[in-house]
Image (spheres, rainbow, N blue to C red):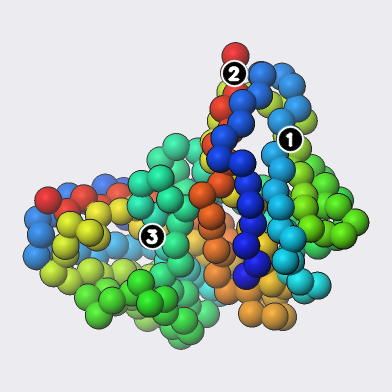
Amino acid sequence: DAKTTQPPSMDCAEGRAANLPCNHSTISGNEYVYWYRQIHSQGPQYIIHGLKNNETNEMASLIITEDRKSSTLILPHATLRDTAVYYCIVRAGENFGNEKLTFGTGTRLTIIP
Amino acid sequence: DTGVSQDPRHKITKRGQNVTFRCDPISEHNRLYWYRQTLGQGPEFLTYFQNEAQLEKSRLLSDRFSAERPKGSFSTLEIQRTEQGDSAMYLCASSLYGTGGNEQFFGPGTRLTVL
């Protein structure tokens, strides 16, 4: 899988939008961008994924640049419970051998009251 | 709760002892994965099953580690002759392969401490 680059840490005020960037300049055409988060001492939680179009679900929005070399995860109204490590992962599609997730060290997001 | 479950949640053992962990995936998920996570690092892939077949093993999975999924449902991960370096969180995930997304859903993990 292609490597990703994320800032090691970020702070965001409670109630504001949290925007988490991710660079994946070597992403290939059959690779998706996945986001997971891990709250302290819990297993990772799937958030969202996308190929090239922007995606939104009940948890977050994913904005992927047109050249697909970077993306941003947006938590629209951050709460204290969103404090976690957020992982951006690039992964091949189901028909291209996407068995494992390759985690980096992620971004530690702290929501400030 | 129909999520992935793992048992035990915590295990403390002495060096040289054998330990076994269990993972129950989401019902009807045909893929099951094991990962290991050490402090300050992201999870690292160990192995995965499709139904009962073990299809890939990481180089991290030494000869002391063995995983099974005998009936294609729950899985066990055994570590023989534990070493202090085996201390970590062991995470299990499952997914439904063949429907397009193959998103992996994780359990709460088993935290192993080897004294």
Name the chain under label 2.
Answer: A
> Which residue lies under the disc numbered 1?
A19
Q: Marks 3 and 2, Cα distance to the nearest angstrom?
A: 30 Å
Q: In this view, does A83 lie above or below B93?
A: above
**Are labels 2 and 1 assigned to the same chain?**
yes
Which residue is rendered at x = 22% and y = 75% of the image? B64
Residues at circles 3 and 2 in contact by the CB criterion of under 8 Å: no
Name the chain under label 3.
Answer: B
Q: Quadrant of the N terminus of chain A?
A: bottom right
> Which residue lies under the disc numbered 3?
B36
Q: Which amino acid does label 3 sit on?
A: Arg
Name the chain under label 1.
Answer: A
Q: Is mark 3 on a helix, strand or loop?
A: strand
On the image, the x and y values in percent for residue B91 come to 41, 57
Q: Is mark 1 on a helix, strand or loop?
A: strand
Q: Is residue A42 above or below residue B102?
A: above
Which residue is rendered at x = 71% and y = 43% of the image? A21
> Which residue lies under the disc numbered 2?
A112
Q: How crowded is mark 2: few (under 14 residues within 10 Å), some or many (20 or more)?
A: some
Tell me if residue B8 can be seen: no
Left or right? Give the position of B104 relative to B13: right
Q: Is mark 2 on a helix, strand or loop?
A: strand
Q: Which of B37 and A66 is in front in this view?
A: A66
Q: Residues within 10 Å of mark 1 (few under 14, many from 20)?
A: many
